[in-house]
Amino acid sequence: MRVLITRHRSAADRLETVLQAKGYETIKAPLLEIVDTGAPVELAGVQAILATSTNGVAALARAVSARDMKVLAVGNATAAAAREAGFVDVESAGGNAAALAALAQRRCVAGKGRLLHIAGGHVAGHMAESLKEAGFAVDTVTLYEAQTPERLDDPVLAEITGRKIDAVLFYSPRTAATFVRLIEETDASGDCSRMVAVCLSEAVASAAAPLKWRGIRVAGAPNGDAMLEALESVGKTDGSDEQ
């Protein structure tokens, strides 16, 4: 099976290694480029850092030298990235932004110190607002921007129009929407009927839905293991996946 990876470059490289070890053929089309903003990070008075992405963890690691603060991560992949970056007090919420807000309320004390949310340029959800309503002081610092390309690279487009790709992996609504936009700007929309879109969540699937796919698979949970399971299920696709 030939799989198109749309994650940003460093994440795509890691995912490619995993997929190739499982026997998949891969092609990479990073639809996001991660760029540091250079925003200052003030850690004084912070009782915990809220990390909602591996990109945020990487940007934080580049921005500060301290590694002893409490880091509450949205999921296991983000927690693993924090540990790999050298942070020593890390806990995963094992879910989404709502789960992270709930973990913060269990592990932190309102009024004891600020919560610092490390974010990208596109902040989704209402995590900070819910924590503020619970009495916490929350600061959001944008440490990176995720920029999208203006066009698909010619080799990638050739793979799509040549109908050589079986599945494409989408990990965010923004990457799915970017792919839809770039495809619709070419004459390749019909070629997506050869591919199955494997999506991290229903929100991602909704962003991918404007194209006519062979099928759309949604991961059973918003994490990397569930995405791999969803991809594996593509090999069992039958007529029930037809749109």
Image (spheres, helix red, strand yellow):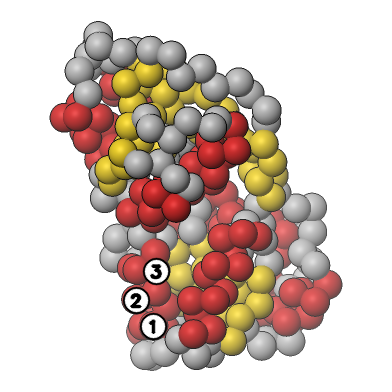
Position in image of residue 189 (x %, y %):
68, 71
Mark 2: give few (<14), some (14-19) or many (20+) Cα within 10 Å. Answer: some
Find disc 1 in the rendering and name its residue: 232
> Is residue 205 or residue 92 the one in the foreground?
92
Residue type at the position of mark 1: Glu
- Residue 41, above or below 178: above
At x 39% / y 83%, what residue is drawn? 232
Can residue 57 be seen in the rendering of this structure?
yes
Labelled pair 2, 3 in contact (Cβ < 8 Å): yes
| Residue located farthest toward the left when viewing the structure as drawn | 106
Which comes before the other along the chain, label 3 or label 1? 3
At x 74% / y 87%, what residue is drawn? 162
Find disc 2 in the rendering and name its residue: 229
Element assignment for label 2: helix
At x 43% / y 14%, what residue is drawn? 44
Position in image of residue 32 (x %, y %):
65, 52
> Is residue 18 or residue 153 the one in the foreground?
18
| Residue located farthest toward the top when viewing the structure as drawn | 111
Find disc 3 in the rendering and name its residue: 227
- Residue 132, above or below 243: above
